[in-house]
Every structure is written in C-alpha cells, then in structure tokens.
Amino acid sequence: MSKANASPLIDRRHLDFLLYELLDVERLTRYPRFAEHNRETFDAAIELAHQIAVEKFLSHNRKSDLNEPQMVDGKVVLIPEIADALDAYNDSGFAAALADFEAGGMQLPFVVATVCDSMFSAANPGTVAYPALARAAANLLEVYGTDEQKRLYMQPIVAGRYYGTMCLSEPQAGSSLADIRTLAEPRDDGSYRIRGAKMWISAGDHELGENIVHLVLARIAGAPAGVRASASSSCRAGASTTAARARHVTTCAWPGSTTRWGNAAASTLSSSSARSTTATVTWWDRQTRALRRCST
C-alpha cells in the first residue's frame, strides 16, 4: 500500500502517527522477543495485510451478505470467495501472526498484529471471523495445552489447516455465561462426562479446513453459581468419551486423543475434504523470518 495512495480501509498517515509517534512501537524491538523486527518488518506486515484485505476480503463483502451460508446435503456451502480469501490469509502467515518463530509464526507484537487484523475486519468482518476464532482457540492451547495437544491441535491452526470455535452460549441463557447449564460430571477415572446444549456457535461448521477444534464451556457438577465454576472442554457429535484427566477441569476425549490441559480441553471435528492451497505473491518466509515477494 503506497502511503501516497488513498485506501478504502484506513488513513495510513494517521496510522503511522499512532504507531510510531504516539505509541512509539519501535521501542518494542528492544525486547528480546521482538529483536529481529524493526519498522520495516512492521510496515511490510501491515502493507501485506492491507493488500490481501482489499483484493481478497473487501471484494466480496457485499456478496457474502447477499448469499448467506446454506446447508446442502449435510454440508455448509459458502460462496467460493471466502475460501479464496482465507487461502491467501493463511498462505501469507497471518494465522500465525502472534506465534513464535520456532512454531512457524511471525512473532509480531500484539499491537502490530492488531493493526493487521483491523485491515481484514474493516474489509470484511464476516470472513475474517473464521480465522480470528481459530486464533483464539490456538491462544488457549498455547497457554494451557500440553506439548502433545499443541502438536495435534494448535500447530495445525497456526499453519492454517485447522479452524476453531468457542462454544459458550446456550438456549436458555443466551450469552450470560453465569447461567449456562451444560454440565461436566466427574468420573472415577478422572475424566468428565459432558451433558448440555449449545447454540449459535460462530463458524461452527464449514468446509474451509481439514478440521475444526471446538472449545466447549461447561459447569462442573456441584460447583457454586457464577462464572468461576465453569471450565472449558470440547465435544464432538456422536463420539464416545474416554479417559482424559485434569484437576478441577471439564474434559471430554475420544479414542486416540489425549485432550487434557490446565483448565480446558479440545478435540477435532473432521470435515469431508482438505482444501489445497495456492501461492501468493507476498508471503512470510518461516526460515528467514522475513516477508518475501516473487513474480508469478
């Protein structure tokens, strides 16, 4: 994005003022975590986000409003532009904007990643919701997941292969989390059995990726009223529970999985197909830790 050119999304001069004069985000490069970054890498990430947002997200904003998701033969059907936009988003590394270099991420400061996110949100808030929810699930796994869970569930999200959700709201409670009734009952083997119903789960089913990681909020049996008695878990329709242990944690697991961590658990919901990816003109090189460009 040329700073001299008008943008349909943002005034770049105002953005530069906020980032580099008011907030002085270049100071963050003094910290070891961001030492390999500088203003040039920050600007390159923002410019790439703007380019993709304008070319891939903004272009179908109105069309996606006019063509809502449809259930056809048991599958959720979206307009093809959504998959195309998210392929570009994932191929360019934005699913891993906050992730460590070692995990294949950009390791951007939160404030710079938020600016990149704002480009996509300004262009098309509906489409960017899919990877935004997935990143939230990945963040939870990063903090509370075991190494095995991170390998199975977080890394595919960071790579843009999996998506994720937060299953919170319920029919009788809406989004009042203190009033949820989904119950986690302790079992003798240390796992929990989940009973309840969830509703209006954003990005709850689609064919955009290989799997969807669903994080499900439940109340531990016998716990006092209020949000402090809740814990996060995951469930998959038609799956039987197996042992997964966690202290004071709601957990639901399936054969072959080990979904256990500090205060949450996750599993994967398989979709029927895996979508092949396409190359982009500009992308994040995970080896050299730099934005690279090529002519195609």
Image: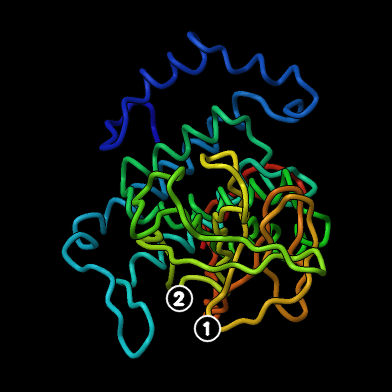
Colour theme: rainbow
At x 69% / y 65%, what residue is drawn?
192
Residue at the spot x=44%, y=66% of the render? 197
**Left or right: 164, with 55 as reference point:** right
Residue 86 position within the rendered picture, expressed as x and y whole percent measured from the top left:
45, 60
Q: Secondary structure at mark 1?
A: loop
Residues tagged 1 and 2 counted as in contact (Cβ below 8 A): yes
| 155 to 136, vertically: above or below | below
Q: CA distance from mark 1 to mark 2?
A: 7 Å
Mark carried by residue 237: none
Q: Which residue is mark 2?
A: 207
View extreme (left): residue? 66
Foreground residue, 207 or 159?
A: 207
List the residue tagged with mark 1: 273
Q: Is residue 252 left or right of residue 280?
A: right
Q: Hey, which residue is sitting farthest top in the picture?
A: 22
- Where residue 237 sits: x, y (%)? 53, 79
Q: Earlier in the sequence, mark 1 or mark 2?
A: 2
Q: Nearer the viewer, residue 251 or 279?
A: 251
Q: Determine the image quadrant of residue 236.
A: bottom right
Q: Residue at x 80, y 47 (%)?
A: 102
- Compared with 165, 101 (above or below) is above
Give how far across and how far down residue 209 sits, in percent: 53, 71
Residue 66's image quarter?
Answer: bottom left
Which secondary structure, mark 2?
Answer: loop
Please tell me whether residue 189 is drawn above or below residue 104 in the rendered image: below
Q: Could you classify mark 2 by the number of other residues whose Cα lies within 10 Å: few (under 14), some (14-19), or many (20 or more)?
A: some
- Residue type at mark 2 is Glu
